[in-house]
Amino acid sequence: MSTTLEKGQTINFYQATTPIIISVFGVYLTIGIALGVLPRFVQSNLGFDSIIVGLVIGLQSLSTLLTRAYSGKITDTKGAKTSKMSGVILAVIAGAAYILAVLFQTHPLLALSFLLIARIIHGVGESFLVTGALTWGIGLVGHTNSGKVMTWNGIAMYAGIAIGAPVSIWLSKEYSIMPAFALIALLPIASWLSTAKLPSLPTDKDHVRTPFYKVIGAISGQGLGLAFSSMAFGCIASFIALFFSQKNWGDASLAFIIFGACYVFTRILFASFPDKYGGFTIAFISLTIEVVGQMLIWASVSKTLAIIGCGLTGVGFSLIFPALGVLAIQKVKPQMRGTALGAYVAFVDLSLGLAGPIAGLIAGWFDYQTVYLFGGISGVVSMIILLFNKK
């Protein structure tokens, strides 16, 4: 049984955060694995159309969004470790539901029901895991390292998705879909073990909790800034492949690789910058780079320029989350940190949920290139919001 960290006590940064980062990476591998094989499974194996594919894929993000407030409350009242471990357990249950879907694939409606249940549970698990992991990490190493904690957790999240998807596609081609879904059930167990011995954080049960709507109000400036800045990522994720196809530039795999590499390396090299130089300064510089990247894609006349624009967008987008997050958690008392982080991350869920449909309408009215003008304008709006919320 692990010990509880005394109030005001901290432990070595890497000793505390490495197990948490490994744990987050393990669970996000399961999310990437699901994204890699689900569309084909739903369409080819179960025989449903693209609307059902969209429903199955989108249901996880929706359940994550709708449970951010509750996961924040549990994190603050029951403890960050409890919240994070609950997310791990839910991921195991989701894996079991995916396996049941495969076992009953000869009965498409029953298999689909298991898939929908799995996606809801997976989404709720993600909500608990992220809120608990971020709060736990910050609590263990101190709020002065909050930006660094958010930076490394973000790397674990995106790396897990980026690696999980191709791994699952390879497994399903070489063997069958069952090994991929079995991994979803098994990987969270490794995630559990990596953090089992870390100390818990003390909770203040006598603290009078601030209502969630007031927490949202307190961090709304940073949350909205994050939401508008995330539109650029949504535009690249949704339409860069179709944009390259429209321009006859071949596939967009290099654009995705450059964006991802720039995103990850920027986080690795400059992880401490939001804490060292302040959230406002790093966020403003990052937004400027992101806007330049989006405008370069919009104005690009060659594949090379578009790829450079993707790279700059990756550099700019990389540190916005931790930089604005540093500002956001300063708005609330430490006892409400889990709720604040849950609310803050919900703005990303909302943004990515809206970015695709809005960009799709713009592409329909104009063309795919104009989507990146929208991404650039969204970045400028984020900068304006930031200027009115410096502290």
Image (spheres, helix red, strand yellow):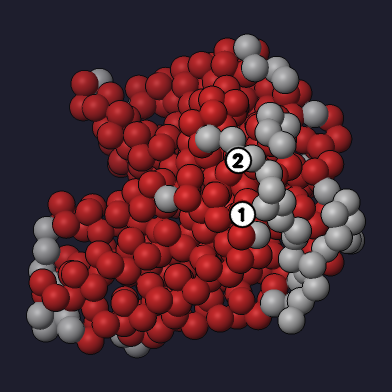
Mark 1, secondary structure of its residue: helix
Give the residue drawn at x 36%, y 53%: 63
Residue 238 visible in the displayed image: yes
Mark seen at residue 209: 2
In-front residue for pair 10/254:
10
Above or below for 328 versus 63 = above
Give the residue drawn at x 46%, y 63%: 125
Residue lying furthest front in this view?
Answer: 206
Residue 294 visible in the displayed image: no
In-front residue for pair 245/338:
338
Of the numbered discs 2 and 1, the one sitting upstream in the chain is 1
Above or below for 184 versus 59 = below
Q: Quadrant of residue 289?
A: top right
Mark 2, secondary structure of its residue: loop
Q: Position of residue 79 (x, y in %)?
A: 65, 59
Disc 2 crowd rating (10 Å Cα; few below 14, some 14-19, many 20+) is some
Q: Position of residue 173 (x, y in %)?
A: 33, 79
User: Residue tagged by mark 1?
Assistant: 77
Kindly identify the amino acid type of the residue bearing the numbered disc 2. Answer: Arg
2 and 1 marks in contact (CB < 8 Å): yes
Q: Using residue 189 as the reference point, say whether residue 251 is left or right of it.
A: left
Q: Quadrant of the C terminus?
A: top right
Give the residue drawn at x 68%, y 29%: 331
